[in-house]
Each structure stands twice: as C-alpha cells, then as structure tokens.
Amino acid sequence: MELEYISLSEFLNNSIYLQKGDYLYKHNKDEYPLKKDYDISNLFFVIENNQHKLKVHNMSNNNVINMDLSSTSEHWWILALPNSVRKQIGLDRIN
C-alpha cells in the first residue's frame, strides 16, 4: 500500500476531518512535495482535533502548534491514515 498526500484544498472539499495520528506536511510551494523537497522539520502529526482546528506535533523539534486548516494560507499537504492502518496501530477513526 502506498500512501500519498493530498492538497489541503482537495481535503477540505471532502468534508472529513483529520484525527489523532494523521499527518500533515507544510510545503514551501503549492506543488506536491517530492522526495527531493521533503524536509522532516515540516512534518507534523495530529495530537488533538476539533473539526479543522488542530493541535499538531512537529516531528523534528517536538514543538506543538495550534492551527485551523480552514483558515490557513500556507501550503499544507494532508496524509489521513486509511482505516485499515488506523486499526493496526490502535487508532480507530471517529467520524
């Protein structure tokens, strides 16, 4: 199974919400993040969610930030874990 990011705008059009354990990547441009562009310092995972208002944890420096996906102007890419993966690691999707 290959997991791919989707753009923030595409994600918001799907009318679903991120859950604890899902990933986000903040890119410096509005293009799919290629491996050569990938920077672990811009990789985050969701630790709390309230619809599109999130608390996310940075993978490289342990910073925790609050954000609202519905109002950001930054280039975020979303990786919501498939239900089968969520179940295997003990994270059941709520919605």
Image (cartoon, rainbow, N blue to C red):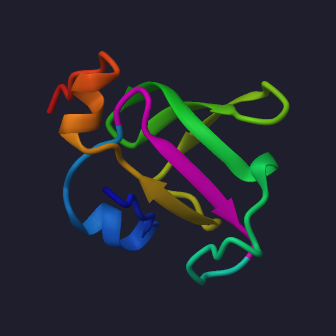
Q: Is residue 21 visible?
A: yes
In the image, the segment drawn in magenta is: 19-28
Q: Nearer the viewer, residue 83 or 76?
A: 83
Which quadrant of the figure contains the N terminus?
A: bottom left
Which quadrant of the figure contains the C terminus?
A: top left
Q: Nearer the viewer, residue 68 or 62?
A: 62
Q: Residue furthest bottom?
A: 31
Q: Residue at x 76, y 73 (%)?
A: 37
Q: Residue at x 43, y 53 (%)?
A: 79
Q: Residue furthest top?
A: 90
Q: Is residue 12 left or right of residue 40?
A: left
Q: Which quadrant of the figure has residue 22?
A: top left
Q: Residue furthest front?
A: 1
Q: Is residue 70 visible?
A: no
Q: Which quadrant of the figure has residue 19?
A: top left
Q: Which quadrant of the figure has residue 33?
A: bottom right
**Is residue 4 located in the magenta-colored stretch of the structure?**
no
Can you give x and y, in whole percent of width and height, for residue 21 in the image? 44, 29
Q: Is residue 51 left or right of residue 30?
A: left
